[in-house]
Image: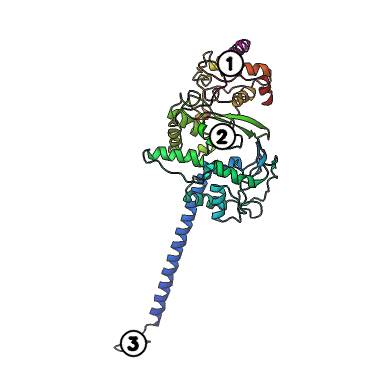
């Protein structure tokens, strides 16, 4: 169309064309803006999932020594046979690449495979069942974002009849509740945050609780300590005793919130330095915000004192005497004859949660081989520690001597622990 203004003729079609171009440009800008917002939102969810995976220490159980992260294959020795962790990278053939969010959620919170089979509770879905919908979705987004790794774990080697997954149906009806975490209104936000991290993501009770004959956590003795097998970096599987995490004298009674949060976040406190399987846990926790780790400490320190029954026995006088002499010769300089330790020599053994653990495996391991260093220093404080690194005594002392020292420290300074035998030391070699 055209119009006349006096003697001039103005063609207005180009204006319509310009308007169309402007509208199209605005539409493109809106689309790009929405796309950018969607990408940012997806990135935020993936980053949230990465944080949750760190808090849950997923990489430790789903990575074999020398293997690709999250590709599975780590060996678990259980009383029911040998299991291997699964590949949780997004490989479609050997991992979770073909899983939907609903299938991922069912595995994580209900212990059910996409084909309907039950998962063994060595995978702690008994804790992950408490995760929120949003956190499950974030974890799913994170694992889907990883580089796929084609790796199929070895077949499990379960003793009959435990290889029959159908038996886990009745097991779940007895020992598993599919339920989400419920905040306690009478507790602080910090306490609730700590409870969620400890009970759900951290699944601390999986190692720090005894289990019954069918492999379920003893609900009457939660967090009072447990014994579990752990495969070291050299591929050797040994037994370890997880400490009592309640406020019992056999557990964390002498620890303050600061002691505990420092240990969990930085790998060192006035009470202890990290070693053994806790190296992997602290390696993850050291990456979390300090407020979250402190919340965990606040929650743990709120747990009422509880402990497992110690078998009453008459200790051999000669063994205790030999243990005292050996302790003073080999240990007393750093840990002091009274077990009080020193700020620049060694941590205290009096009141030690490791010494007072329901079982002695961790204590024996550290005497035999010393405290293995974390692969990566969890903090500057850990690197600057004033304590001397404890030497190993496995090549210097016989099994009977190690047993005597362990028996002595487990029954001195107010401790009451079962005697350690020469045979049990030999099993830890």
Residue 105 position within the rendered picture, expressed as x and y whole percent measured from the top left? 54, 51
Quadrant for residue 214, please give it: top right
Q: Which residue is mark 3?
A: 3
Quadrant (top left/top right/bottom left/bottom right) for the N terminus:
bottom left
Identify the image's colour scheme: rainbow, by chain, secondary structure or one colour: rainbow
Image side of residue 22 versus residue 235, left or right: left
Residue at point 60%, 26% (across, down)? 362
**Does the magenta segment cover residue 321?**
yes
Q: Nearer the viewer, mark 3 or mark 2?
A: 2
Of mark 3 and mark 2, the one earlier in the sequence is 3
Dot 1 falls on a residue whose secondary structure is: helix
Quadrant for residue 162, please give it: top right
Between 174 and 110, the residue placed more toward the observer is 174
Of mark 3 and mark 1, the one earlier in the sequence is 3
Quadrant (top left/top right/bottom left/bottom right) for the C terminus:
top right
Q: Do residues under tags 3 and 2 come within 8 Å of each other at their CB atoms? A: no
**Does the magenta segment cover residue 315?**
yes
Please say whether residue 43 is visible from this viewpoint.
Answer: yes
Between 310 and 131, the residue placed more toward the observer is 310
Quadrant for residue 391, please give it: top right
Dot 2 falls on a residue whose secondary structure is: helix
> Label for residue 408?
1
The magenta segment is: 308-328
Q: Which residue is mark 2?
A: 207
């Amino acid at each position: 169309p055209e119009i006349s203004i006096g003697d001039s003729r103005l063609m207005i079609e180009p204006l319509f064309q310009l308007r169309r171009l402007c509208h199209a440009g605005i539409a493109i800008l809106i689309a790009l803006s929405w796309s950018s917002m969607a990408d940012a939102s997806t990135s935020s969810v993936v980053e949230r999932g990465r944080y949750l995976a760190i808090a849950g220490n997923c990489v430790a159980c789903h990575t074999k020594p020398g293997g690709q992260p999250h590709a599975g294959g780590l060996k678990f020795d259980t009383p029911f046979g040998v299991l291997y962790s699964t590949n949780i990278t997004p490989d479609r053939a050997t991992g979770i690449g073909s899983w939907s969010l609903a299938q991922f959620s069912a595995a994580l919170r209900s212990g059910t495979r996409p084909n309907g089979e039950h998962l063994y509770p060595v995978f702690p879905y008994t804790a992950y069942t408490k995760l929120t919908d949003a956190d499950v979705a974030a974890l799913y987004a994170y694992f889907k974002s990883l580089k796929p790794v084609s790796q199929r774990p070895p077949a499990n080697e379960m003793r009959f009849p435990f290889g029959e997954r159908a038996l886990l149906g009745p097991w779940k009806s007895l020992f598993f509740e599919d339920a989400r975490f419920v905040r306690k209104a009478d507790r602080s936000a910090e306490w609730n945050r700590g409870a969620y991290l400890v009970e759900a993501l951290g699944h601390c009770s999986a190692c720090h609780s005894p289990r019954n004959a069918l492999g379920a956590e003893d609900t009457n003795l939660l967090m009072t300590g447990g014994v579990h097998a752990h495969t070291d970096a050299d591929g050797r599987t040994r037994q370890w005793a997880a400490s009592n995490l309640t406020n019992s004298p056999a557990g964390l009674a002498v620890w303050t919130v600061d002691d505990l949060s420092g240990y969990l976040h930085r790998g060192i406190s006035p009470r202890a330095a990290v070693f053994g399987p806790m190296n992997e846990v602290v390696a993850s926790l050291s990456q979390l915000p300090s407020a979250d780790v402190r919340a965990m400490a606040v929650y743990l320190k709120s747990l009422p004192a509880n402990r497992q029954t110690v078998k009453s026995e008459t200790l051999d006088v000669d063994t205790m005497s030999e243990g005292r002499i050996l302790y003073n010769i080999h240990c007393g300089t750093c840990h002091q004859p009274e077990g009080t330790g020193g700020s620049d020599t060694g941590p205290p053994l009096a009141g030690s949660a490791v010494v007072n653990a329901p079982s002695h495996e961790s204590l024996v391991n550290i005497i035999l081989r010393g405290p293995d260093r974390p692969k990566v220093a969890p903090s500057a404080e850990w690197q600057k520690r004033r304590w001397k690194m404890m030497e190993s005594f496995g090549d210097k002392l016989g099994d009977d001597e190690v047993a005597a020292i362990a028996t002595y420290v487990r029954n001195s300074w107010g401790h009451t622990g079962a005697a350690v035998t020469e045979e049990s030391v030999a099993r830890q070699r």
